[in-house]
Amino acid sequence: MANIEELDKAIGAHGFWKTRLINTIESGKIDTDIETIRQDNQCAFGKWLYGSTLSSFDKSSNHYKTVKELHAEFHKAAAHVVELAVNGKKAEAEKMIAYGGNYARISSKLTQAMVEWKSVSK
């Protein structure tokens, strides 16, 4: 079964990204390389997803596959917001993180998928 603690940490960490993105939009700067942000296997949750902790049973589940796909989309969307912000396209970046924006939509779907996976992992 998937580790509930890892899913809880991931939900919190990915929720915190919106705050980081807001700060980046305001300042036009970020302390992390955009290509690193784009990669879904560099954060703690991504390392766990791709690592050997999860069983082959977990990795064959629809929950895993959905979360893995959405997690990759999340990182691409976050990197795009950062690209816009550091290139002075503040309004476009804000639109992406606002309700209905691409980042906001993917982030919400990822959180929902992690919560669903967690609910069947008890």
Image (spheres, helix red, strand yellow):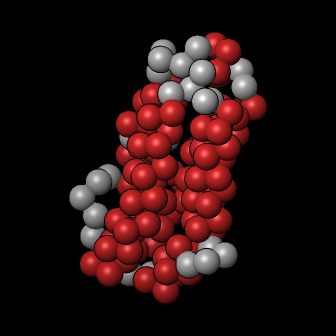
Residue 1 locus on image (x, y percent): 60, 21
Residue 57 locus on image (x, y percent): 67, 15
Which quarter of the rendering shows the C terminus?
top right
Residue 19 locus on image (x, y percent): 37, 68
Residue 45 locus on image (x, y percent): 44, 37
Residue, x 58% and y 53% (percent of image)? 111
Direction from residue 113 to residue 92 in the image, left or right: left
Residue, x 66% and y 75% (percent of image)? 100
Nearer to the camera, 21 or 28: 21
User: Could you tell me if residue 98 is visible in this image?
Assistant: yes
Q: How many marks?
A: 0
Which residue of the protein is positioned furthest toward the front in this rendering? 122
Query: Vertical placement of 66 versus 49: above or below?
Result: below
Which residue of the protein is positioned furthest toward the left in this rendering? 31
User: Could you tell me if residue 35 is visible in this image?
Assistant: no
Direction from residue 119 to residue 19 in the image, left or right: left
Q: Quadrant of residue 101?
A: bottom right
Direction from residue 78 to residue 61 in the image, left or right: right
Query: Vertical placement of 54 versus 91: above or below?
Result: above
Which residue of the protein is positioned furthest toward the right in this rendering? 62
Direction from residue 25 to residue 84 in the image, left or right: right
Residue, x 67% and y 43% (percent of image)? 116
Nearer to the camera, 87 or 24: 24
Query: Vertical placement of 77 versus 22: above or below?
Result: above
Residue, x 48% and y 15% (percent of image)? 52
Query: Vertical placement of 113 versus 101: above or below?
Result: above
